[in-house]
Image (cartoon, rainbow, N blue to C red):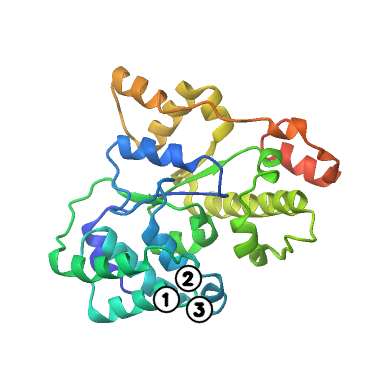
Amino acid sequence: MEMSETKLLKKDPVVIGALGGSGTRLIAQTLMELGYYLGDEIDEQNDSLLFTRIFQRPDWIRTTGRENFDRYLSMFTRRMTGEGWSLTDIIRYITALYRKSTIKSGRRKELIHAFTQNWCSGKHQLTRWGWKEPISHLFLQELVDYFPNMKYIHVIRHGLDMAFSTNTQQLRYWGYRYDLSVNLEKDNIPYMQLEYWIRSNKQAIETARNSLGSNFYLLNYDEYCQNPEPELERLLEFLDIKTTDEECRRLVNLSKPTSTGRYKNRNIRLFNDRQISEVTQLGFEV
């Protein structure tokens, strides 16, 4: 496992994961305002495109072994912390970009970036770093094994609202990990989306609690938006960061009103009693 040098140089990261569309953009923005380095290439949702390009490869993930996964995770870590890549690393990354990756846009630009950064890289003296990519929760056990002292923020949003979301990417790409397969033309997509929400959140929460203990923070996005002050205080306590009152007010102002409760205008008879019960058990009123 190629990690010893990196782990000696850097603190373990803070990782943000969730079902896509759960509000992770705001949480990532909050961390950046607090001085966290989340990468040199992030999209409008504050996702780490480097993590996405390497690990958003469902077919590869199905068949790859743990050693190979850790090899790519080591590459990702070295790039994030400013260390150079070997020619072998670059070849592996080209493979990730051009074979089986679901991310097609910007590949040529990223390929040039991968080559040039290797010659101008310098080790970043990072005290606060991490990344935000919703699919991180899919690889939580692998991440914990690699970064035993990492902190993980899992963002969760009302399951019935998420069921009616048009963002079905995780369901389509990763449903198989929860024994779900989907046909967008034939299936009851809200039902399938809610089932994915239930199974993926329960597994992520169980893994995080068992593996991380106090280094795990479950953030209810609905509560964060409705009552940001105490929620922000809890987040800062989890991160072990002290701020001034002025800084807190600035961070609270990042919170924008969100469209919660949209399910109330939809037909929730699409869901069965067990699913509704699961939503309430995960902390949401119906």
**In this figure, which residue is indicated by the disc labeled 2?**
101
- Nearer mark to the viewer, of 3 and 1: 1
**In this figure, which residue is indicated by the disc labeled 1?**
98
Q: Secondary structure at mark 1?
A: helix
Characterize the local packing of mark 1: few (<14), some (14-19) or many (20 or more) Cα atoms within 10 angstroms: some
* For the residues bearing labels 3 and 1, Cβ distance under 8 angstroms: no
Residue type (three-letter) at the residue carrying disc 3: Thr
Percent position (x, y) of residue 274? 82, 46
Percent position (x, y) of residue 172? 64, 62
The residues tagged by marks 1 and 2 sit, at their Cα atoms, a distance apart of 7 Å
Tell me: 168 left or right of 18: right
- Decide which of 119, 112 is in the foreground and name it: 112
Residue type (three-letter) at the residue carrying disc 1: Tyr
**In this figure, which residue is indicated by the disc labeled 3?**
64
Tell me: 6 left or right of 136: left
Residue type (three-letter) at the residue carrying disc 2: Ser
When asked about the image quadrant of residue 239, the answer is top left
Mark seen at residue 118: none
The answer to whether residue 53 is above or below residue 38 is below
The residues tagged by marks 3 and 1 sit, at their Cα atoms, a distance apart of 17 Å
- The structure residue drawn at horizontal position 30% and vertical position 70%, both measured from the top left corner, is 111
